[in-house]
Every structure is written in C-alpha cells, then in structure tokens.
Image (cartoon, rainbow, N blue to C red):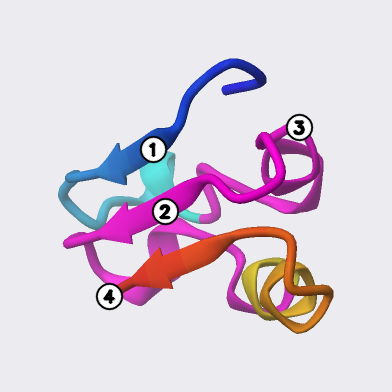
C-alpha cells in the first residue's frame, strides 16, 4: 500500500475479514492516496480511518 495511489476494498463481511485493515495499514498509505471502500464497515477499522482522514493525509470514498 506504500506505493499505491488508490486502495480499493471489496470484501464480504466475515469473522476472518473483521478489521482486515487497521491503523498500521492506513499509516502506510501514501500521502494524498485515495481509499475506496465498497465493503461493509466492519472490515476496516473505522476509528483508524477517521484518524487518517482528520490528519488530511488520505481521501476516502465510501
């Protein structure tokens, strides 16, 4: 994810995918990158995503 301009998440919500992406993952994203989430909210750590959005480092489309 360090070199991606766009990260797009499309996954089913299962116990195995719960918080599949978290703070460490979002922190590795390039500044100015876009995160597209068409999956259920439980798959990515919402608090971690919101923290990165508040830092104005990444953009998100949900």
Question: Which residue corresponds to the image point at 17% horizontal and 62% vertical from the top-left?
Answer: 38
Question: Within the image, what quadrant is residue 46 found in?
Answer: bottom right
Q: Tell me the distance, in whole angstroms, between the alpha carbons under discs 4 and 3.
A: 19 Å
When the figure is inspected, residue 29 is found, relative to residue 56, above or below; the finding is above
Left or right relative to 41: residue 50: right
Left or right relative to 21: residue 16: left
Question: Within the image, what quadrant is residue 61 found in?
Answer: bottom left
Q: Are marks 2 and 4 in contact (CB under 8 Å)?
A: no
Residue of label 2: 35
- The first of marks 2 and 4 along the sequence is 2
Q: Label 2's element?
A: strand
Left or right relative to 15: residue 47: right
Residue of label 1: 7
Q: Tell me the distance, in whole angstroms, between the alpha carbons under discs 2 and 4.
A: 8 Å
Q: Label 3's element?
A: loop
Q: Tell me the distance, in whole angstroms, between the alpha carbons under discs 3 and 2.
A: 12 Å
The residues colored magenta run 19-47
- Residue 28 has which mark? 3
**Neighbour tally class for label 1: few under 14, some 14-19, many 20 plus, Cα within 10 Å:** some
Q: Label 1's element?
A: strand
Left or right relative to 8: residue 31: right
**Neighbour tally class for label 3: few under 14, some 14-19, many 20 plus, Cα within 10 Å:** few
Quadrant for the N terminus in the image: top right
Q: Are marks 2 and 1 in contact (CB under 8 Å)?
A: yes
Q: Tell me the distance, in whole angstroms, between the alpha carbons under discs 3 and 1.
A: 11 Å
Residue of label 4: 62
Magenta span contains residue 62? no
Question: Which residue corresponds to the image point at 48% horizontal and 23% vertical from the top-left?
Answer: 4
Q: Position of residue 52 (x, y in %)?
A: 75, 67
């Amino acid at each position: 994810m360090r070199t991606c301009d766009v990260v797009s998440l499309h996954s089913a919500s299962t116990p195995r995918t719960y918080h599949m992406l978290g703070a460490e993952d979002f922190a590795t994203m390039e500044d100015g990158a876009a995160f597209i989430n068409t999956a259920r909210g439980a798959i990515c750590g919402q608090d971690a995503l919101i923290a990165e959005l508040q830092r104005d480092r990444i953009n998100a489309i949900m």
